[in-house]
Image: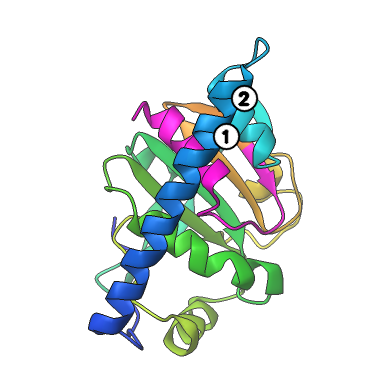
Amino acid sequence: MTATTVQGAGGGAGSGAARGFGWAIGALAFAGLLAGMLSIGTGGRTTADLFLRRSKGEAMSTPVTPAQASYALEARRDGKIVPVTLRDFDARLVFVNFWGTFCPPCIEELPSLLALARSRDARDLVVVAVSYDDSWQAIDDFFAKNASAQVPPNFVVVRDPTGVAGRDLKAAFGTDKIPESYLVRQGTIEAKFVNARDWIDPAIVGLIEVLLGT
């Protein structure tokens, strides 16, 4: 499944160096956070629990239901709208993000969500960005105007076509709010995050590292 591709703006060696420096700082922060956690002990909690607490996420450990797994979404492939379900994504971690171009907090967190996707191989992590916009035109216009770089292959923009509150995919996940995000690993919803986040925060990166076993 291929994500929507957008025109980059502001690339070049300087921006690449800046991104590399940023990731180096992030790696150091993550190492420091992990060392601090190990030094104080877990008190019966797992490392994943501690990272989740630091990131202010909510532990779930809930199986994905058949209704969630088989819910029909719209995706774009070769310029055509095609059906897709969460079952179609086989990465080790599937990051489900409910969003919309009309939602300021969704837009606020988008750069860090794209950065998170870029930091991982598609076999390890795929971000499924489920839009609640009224049309694909609104999504296309947004990325044409606002994206600062190409969307990576493991950031897949899909659209929920239902348009009826209480009967859409986010309702199947038990919510009517956006942004809201879920980490799914091998058919289990491991964690839930309400509201916008910095998705390259060391606690969130650490949680993903633990869930991937890396």
- Residue 62 coordinates in the image, percent (x, y): 61, 23
Q: Residue lying at the far top in this picture: please name it.
A: 44
Q: Residue furthest front?
A: 39
- Element type where label 2 sits in the image: helix
Q: Is residue 210 above or below residue 103?
A: above
Q: Is residue 85 something that shows in the picture?
A: yes
Task: Identify the mark nearer the N-term, 1 or 2.
Answer: 2
- Left or right relative to 54: residue 177: right
Q: Are marks 1 and 2 in contact (CB under 8 Å)?
A: no
Rounded to the nearest whole Å, what is the CA distance between mark 1 and mark 2?
A: 28 Å
**Depth check: 20 or 174 in front?**
20
Q: Nearer the viewer, residue 100 or 163?
A: 100
Residue at 43 percent of width and 48 percent of height: 28
Provide residue 49's location: percent of width, then percent of height.
62, 25
- Residues in magenta, as a range: 192-214
Mark 2: amino acid: Asp
Q: Residues within 10 Å of mark 1 (few under 14, many from 20)?
A: few
Q: Is residue 213 left or right of residue 129?
A: left
Q: Quadrant of residue 94?
A: top left
Amino acid type of the residue tagged 1 in the rendering: Ala
187 w.r.t. 55: above or below: above
Q: Position of residue 113 (x, y in %)?
A: 49, 60
Front tag of 1 and 2: 2
What residue does disc 1 label?
Answer: 67
Q: Going by the image, does 185 lie left or right of 172?
A: left
Give x and y (percent) for residue 10: 35, 88
Q: Which residue carries the number 2 mark? A: 49
Q: Considering the image in quadrants, where does the N terminus appear?
A: bottom left
The residue at the point 33 percent across, 80 percent down is: 15
